[in-house]
Amino acid sequence: MNASTHPVLVRAGSAETLQDGATSLITLLADSDRTQGALTANRATLRKGSPGAPAHFHTAMTEMFFVLGGSLRVLLGDRIVTLGTGDFVTVPSRLTHAFAPVRGEEADVLVVFTPGRERFDYYRLLERVYRGEATVEDIKAGSERYDNHYSASPLWQAELAGD
């Protein structure tokens, strides 16, 4: 079997799980190097009160969210939508977006990027920042490498102010 047709199988017990905040876990499923650049996938487990991900955009990737359980708020440019179990949304490149569980709820989400981009080191960096082993400046320095560009969203800030 050649590399372009090799399946990627990740068993739940062997997936690397990172803690990027007091109420948030990221389970690494498949990075672009394992999918020949087709996609990158992770599972986000957001507990009650999790701030989720701040407003940001990607220049070269579409990001997809499939809610496995719970309820998720998603900023999509100039509007906020609520997704429930089984709901799915794609976020095209360059659209500012953010996400967090609905107030008082949890959210379990499959997150997929296409085309794939090596992002697992980005998630590991987030965990190091949470542990105090790296800084927000390190995240900013990696924005091009990880295609993760933070932006301001007064709408999202107002949404989170009610939490």
Image (cartoon, rainbow, N blue to C red):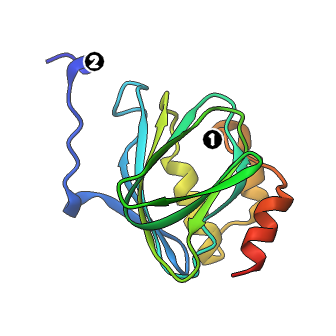
Quadrant in the rendering for residue 136: bottom right
Q: Residue at x 56, y 72 (%)?
A: 102
Q: Between residue 97 and residue 24, name the one nearer to us.
A: 97
Q: Residues within 10 Å of mark 2 (few under 14, many from 20)?
A: few
| Left or right: 23, with 153 as reference point | left
Q: Is 139 rendered above or below residue 57?
A: below
Quadrant in the rendering for residue 61: top right
Q: Is 1 rendered above or below residue 115?
A: above
Q: Between residue 40 and residue 70, name the one nearer to us.
A: 70
Q: Earlier in the sequence, mark 1 or mark 2?
A: 2
Q: Disc 1 versus disc 2: distance between alpha carbons?
A: 23 Å
> Which amino acid lies under the numbered mark 2 shown in the image of this protein?
Ser
| Left or right: 47, with 79 as reference point | left
Expressed as whole percent of the image width and height from the top left, the position of residue 26 reads: 45, 62
User: Mark 1 = which residue?
Assistant: 146
User: Mark 2 = which residue?
Assistant: 4
The kind of secondary structure element at disc 2 is helix
The kind of secondary structure element at disc 1 is helix
Expressed as whole percent of the image width and height from the top left, the position of residue 76 reads: 67, 47
Q: Between residue 159 and residue 115, name the one nearer to us.
A: 159
> Which amino acid lies under the numbered mark 1 shown in the image of this protein?
Tyr
Expressed as whole percent of the image width and height from the top left, the position of residue 8 reads: 24, 36
Residues under numbered marks 1 and 2 in contact, where contact means CB atoms less than 8 Å apart: no
